[in-house]
Amino acid sequence: MQYRIAVVHDTPHMTWSVRQLFRRIIEKGHSPYYLRITSVPYMVRGGLALGDEAPRLDGCIIKGLGDTLTPEDAVARLGIVKSLELARCTTLNSYEGLLKSRDKISQLMYLSENGIPVPETIVTWSISTALRYLARWGRAIVKPVIGSLGRGVLLLEDEDLAFYELSRIVRTGHPIYLQKYIEKPGRDIRIFVVGNTVLGGIYRVSMGWKTNVARGGKPVKAEVDDELARLALKSAATLGLEYAGVDVAEDTDTGRYLVLEVNSAPLWRGFQAATGIDPSEHIVSRIIDLISEKHGDED
């Protein structure tokens, strides 16, 4: 059976990773479509208002929801995913998974409650409280609650400079998301998970403290031991994600692994270059399997 599979993103032109997904969908004998998320109206009763000429979609790979500027915008974009699911479209990742993983606060709560080790973190609107924790920890990272690619992530060390940065955050009406700085060996680890499989891992090596590949971190193939694999699979499953990039730090002070973040729409150019593994092959295979299972249930 030939399926109609869309890739959902919010760029005017298809990105490199979207084009890879398109090629894989075609190679496997199915029909690809591109949906730009801010160009598609949808009905609250379920279904996208694409016009009479548009086919009903069997599956959608959510490659990205784009940059959301307000809570209303984030809710509306997630609503498209819910609308697709109500219209019997298989989504990867699901509305529930995206909802759990969309912001860093919810992520860490779900992970921590399920026994997954995470860095010490506080959320506060009080500058004095934040400064008290900074004094206790010595160094801390302040992050936007919603964000990616290392944007807006700052290292705080000096109390006076920290006061001005924290004041700026509070003035904009945002909470202070403060995390104890983890002493790492000049790298962190990105594990790529699809379904119940760990595809592999990379070290993101950097001379500075930011290790994101988008911020200059160098991807180097990593060996994924049993503990890392278990952490990555459990993290993705806890958040209900079918594909994910799980970021892990090696805490040199304690010798433990700590899960820093789980990305529900990870980039993979650096991962593919370092490992020779193309995640698009596995992502497309996974959604085809899930669509087939659903069609089997309906027969």
Image (cartoon, grey):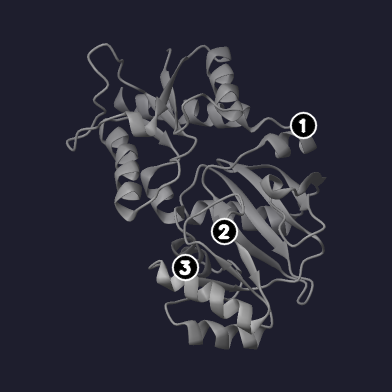
Type of the residue with mark 3: Met
Foreground of the two, 136 or 259: 136
Vertical placement of residue 185 versus 132, above or below: above
Q: Quadrant of the N terminus?
A: top left
Cα separation between marks 2 and 3 = 21 Å
Q: Which residue is found at the position 42% from the left and 78% from the top?
A: 125
Which residue corresponds to the image point at 39% horizontal and 52% vertical from the top-left? 99
**Label 1: few (<14), some (14–19) or many (≥20) C-alpha neighbours in 10 Å:** few
**Which of pointers 2 and 1 lies earlier in the amino acid sequence?**
2
Q: What residue type is disc 1 on?
A: Gly
Left or right of residue 276: residue 234: left
- Give the quarter of the figure containing the C terminus: top left
Q: Residue at x 34, y 29 (%)?
A: 39
Residue to which mark 3 is pinned? 109
**In front of the other: 9 or 227:** 9
Q: Which mark is residue 152?
A: 2
User: Which residue shows up at 38% across the image and 33% down it?
Assistant: 37
- Dot 1 falls on a residue whose secondary structure is loop
Residue of label 1: 276
Numbered tag placed on residue 99 in the rendering:
none
Q: Quadrant of residue 273?
A: top right
Find numbered disc 3 in the image and state the secondary structure of the residue it sits on.
Answer: helix
Mark in the foreground, 2 or 1: 2
Q: Does any portion of residue 247 appear in the rendered image? A: yes
Q: With 55 as the anchor, is 230 left or right in this view?
A: right
Residue 108 image point, x, y percent: 51, 65
Q: Find residue 71 and report its horizontal and vertical position in percent.
A: 33, 55
Vertical side of 172 occupied by 221: above or below: above
Farthest residue in the left direction?
45
Q: CA distance from mark 1 to mark 3?
A: 34 Å
Q: Is residue 1 above or below residue 166?
A: above
